[in-house]
Image (tube, grey):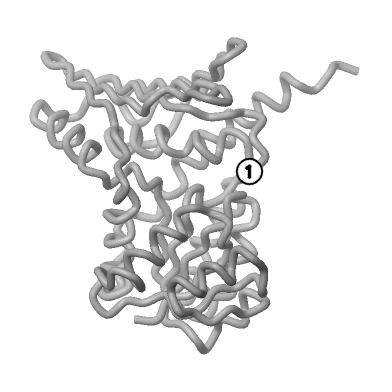
Amino acid sequence: MRIGIVGTENSHVDHIVRHLNVHRAGGDARVVALSGGRDARNDALAAVGGMTVVAAPTDLLGLVDAVVVADRYGAHHRDHALPFLAAGLPVFVDKPLACTVEDAQVMIDTALAHDAPLTSFSALRWIPDAERLVARSSTSGRPHAVVMSGPADPEGEHGGVFFYGIHPVDLALRLAPGEIGDVRTDTTASTVTASFTAGDTRVVVNLVRPTDTRQIPFHGMALTRDTMVEQTLTLDARYCVPGLEVFLDMVRTGRPPIAYPDLLRPIEVLESVATDLRTRRTPAP
């Protein structure tokens, strides 16, 4: 399985290259090419993984069987993913899928039109602590309320709340299926809180601005009629591996692991929050 990567500034790319090319732990899957041209970052990655470096993303066409789009800024994902989806290739778009619902929908529509498997998710979605939280919360049925917390910088250079906010939002929505409604945003000097419904579940996501030296851990809590379960989510050195294996399984089977409507839900929430924050920052005429 020949994999190409678009957008190599993300540290997740280091994890992918080490797992597949250095440790050869993904079966027959190898990263064979990177796009973005020759620079210090790509040359260093290529030296570690023995890969080709090409200039433009579309230069990967014909060289690879599947693509990872890993730009940190989700606004680039649509343009970088579409040529490969139009060619029928499996594509994993690293978090977030996009920074607008419109961009996300265009990618999904292109995937459907060309029978190209597409997926996107937070790496936290599949780590062992997340699996434990999902398993423990499911014993009493669908939660009545879900509360997720984690770090995020609403003024961050890679799309503000989208860049890290996708982590708690994506995991919260794994626990809370259903249509998104009534998104409300509340802010303090250090936090952004999104409250909304997902189906019949009330969801609260707390995004806490990190400092230069510290950030809060990711934490989840689910409440049913008679139970409350909670879990702090710990990221170890292999935290990208479970999600990478999910992507490789999609390439081998052709079956996306997440239904396409569920790819849109976290983007819908985060776009609403980002729009609200922009409105608050815009001075009245």
Q: What element carries label 1?
A: loop
Q: Looking at the image, which residue sits at the far left?
A: 139
Q: Is residue 256 visible?
A: yes
Q: Specify the quadrant that holds the N terminus.
A: bottom left
Determine which quarter of the picture holds residue 146: top left
For residue 243, what is the image quadrant? bottom left
In the image, 273 versus 20, the foreground residue is 20
| Extreme residue toward the bottom, this view | 62
Look at the picture and state if 240 lies above or below 255. above
Q: How crowded is mark 1: few (under 14 residues within 10 Å), some or many (20 or more)?
A: some
**171 shown above or below 118:** above
Quadrant placement of the C terminus: top right
Residue name at image x 37 percent, y 30 percent: 198
Residue at (51% x, 52% y) in the render: 97
In front of the other: 42 or 205 = 42
Q: Which residue is drawn at 71% across and 27% down?
A: 278
Q: Residue at x 32, y 64 (%)?
A: 19
Task: Using the image, determine if residue 93 lies above or below residue 65.
Answer: above
Whole-percent x and y of residue 98? 56, 50
Circle 1 residue = 158
Residue 262: image location, x then y, percent: 38, 47
In the image, 137 versus 66, the foreground residue is 66
Tag 1: residue type? His
Residue 115 seen in the figure: no
Q: Where is residue 168 in the image (x, y as percent from the top left)?
A: 40, 32
* Residue 239 image offset from top left, x and y in percent: 31, 47
The extreme right residue here reads 285
Q: How many labels does the image show?
A: 1
